[in-house]
Image: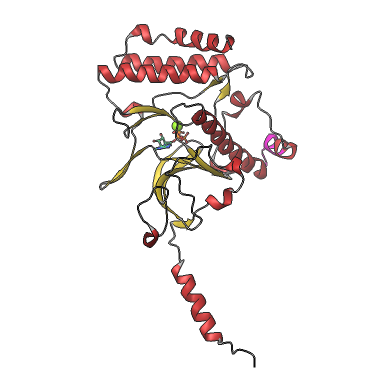
Amino acid sequence: MTPSFDLDDFFARSLLTLSVTELDDDQRWSTWPETAHTLDRGPQPVPDWVVRHDGALDTELGILKSGKEADAFLIDRSLPPEQLTGAPGESSLMVAKRYRSPEHSTFHRSNAYTEGRRTKDSREARAIAKGTAFGKQAAASQWARTEFDVLSRLWSAGLPVPYPVQIVGTELLMEFIGTDDEHGATAAPRLQETRPGPAEIERWTEVIHDAVLRLGELGLVHGDLSPYNILLDPRPEVPTPVLIDVPQVLDLIANPNGPAFLRRDCTTMCTWLRANGAPPAATDPEDWVRECLESWEVR
Ligand SMILES: Nc1ncnc2c1ncn2[C@@H]1O[C@H](COP(=O)(O)OP(=O)(O)OP(=O)(O)O)[C@@H](O)[C@H]1O
Ligand SMILES: [Mg+2]
C-alpha cells in the first residue's frame, strides 16, 4: 500500500516553515555564506565577534552617512533571538559601505589615484574605459574590492583601521567603530567633531604620525587623509584615532602622484593638529614627508 499523501497538510507545513523564516523589509539572511572564497573574507585571525553562523540575519538599522561615492549603513548581524546564548560571534554591529552603481556616482577622482594600478580582466578594463553601464558597475565593485583589500592589508600590518569582515560585489562589511549600549548604537565621532585637550592632541599626533610612517613603510599613501576620515574610537580606555575611507590609497613609489598626495595628506593633518594645539615641532609636514620617503628608501 502506498503511503497516503495529504496535500493540504503538506502546504500547511510549508507555510509554517515560511512564516518562521519570514524576513522584514530591512532584513536579509546573513551574506557570510556567499563569501565562501577566503579572498572575500577578512584576514586571519578572524576576531571572535565576527558572526559566522549561516542562520544569522542581517538587519539594516539605518544610514550613517551618504558620501560622494558610497553610502555607509549600520547593520546588525545576529542569530535569531531564541538562539542567542550570549557567546561571542552570535551578534554584532557592522558598517556596510555600499559603492554606488553607475548613474549616482561620478568617480571623477579615479585617474590620478589609479595610475600604475592594473585591471586584470581586459573586458572589464575596456568597459570601464568606455564608461558603459557594465563598466561603471565593474568600477563600483573595484572600488569596494580595493577598499577591502587595503583594509585587510593594513589591519594585518597592525595599523588602526576597522576590521574588514567581508566583500560581496559593491558592498563591503567592516567593524563598527562606536559604542552599543542601553542607549543604542552611537558611531564614533570624526576627529573634525572633537575638541581635544593638550594631552589628547599630543597622543593623537603620535598615533597619526605613526600611522602615516607605517603606511610609508608599506609603500603606501592614504591619499585622502583628513580629520573627516579619522574616527575617534571610544571603546578603548583611552579613546584613540582610527583611519577609515581607504579605497584611494596609492602607491608611494609606483604612482607618479604618490609623493604629491603624501605631502597633501601630511599638510592637511599637521595643519589640523596644530590648530588644535599640537606643538609645531611635532607637526612639520615636510618632516613627515621626508621621514616617510626615507623609511621607504632604507628598506
Ligand atoms: N567603520 C566605521 N564605523 C563607524 N562609522 C563609520 C565607519 N566607516 C564609516 N563610518 C561613517 O561613515 C562616514 C562615511 O564613511 P567614508 O568616509 O568611508 O565614506 P565616503 O563615502 O568616502 O564618505 P565621504 O565622501 O564623506 O568621504 C564616515 O565619516 C563615518 O562617519
Ligand atoms: Mg570619507
Residue positioned most to the bottom: 1
**Residue 217 on image: x %, y %:** 54, 17
Q: Is residue 160 above or below residue 100?
A: above
Residue at 45%, 15% (x, y): give it.
266
**Residue 75 on image: x %, y %:** 42, 48
Predominant SS along the magenta part: helix
Q: How many marks?
A: 0
The structure's colour scheme is secondary structure
Is 106 in front, or is 100?
100
Q: Is residue 299 above or below residue 98?
A: above
- Ligand 2 lies in which image quarter? top left
Q: Is residue 247 visible?
A: no
Residue at 46%, 56% (x, y): give it.
56
Is 274 in front, or is 93?
93
Does residue 131 belong to the magenta stretch?
Answer: yes
Does residue 51 belong to the magenta stretch?
Answer: no
Residue at 48%, 16% (x, y): give it.
213
Instruction: Determine which quarter of the picture holds residue 113.
Output: top right
Is 262 in front, or is 168?
168
Q: Split into 4 quadrants, where in the image is the C terminus?
A: top right
Q: Is residue 275 visible?
A: yes
**Residue 204 on image: x %, y %:** 35, 20
Residue at 49%, 31% (x, y): give it.
155
Q: Split into 4 quadrants, where in the image is the N terminus?
A: bottom right
Left or right side of 242 for 128: right
| Bounds of the magenta segment | 127-132
Q: Is residue 217 above or below residue 40?
A: above
Instruction: Determine which quarter of the picture holds residue 7.
Output: bottom right
**Residue 100 on image: x %, y %:** 53, 42
Q: Is residue 261 above or below residue 123?
A: above
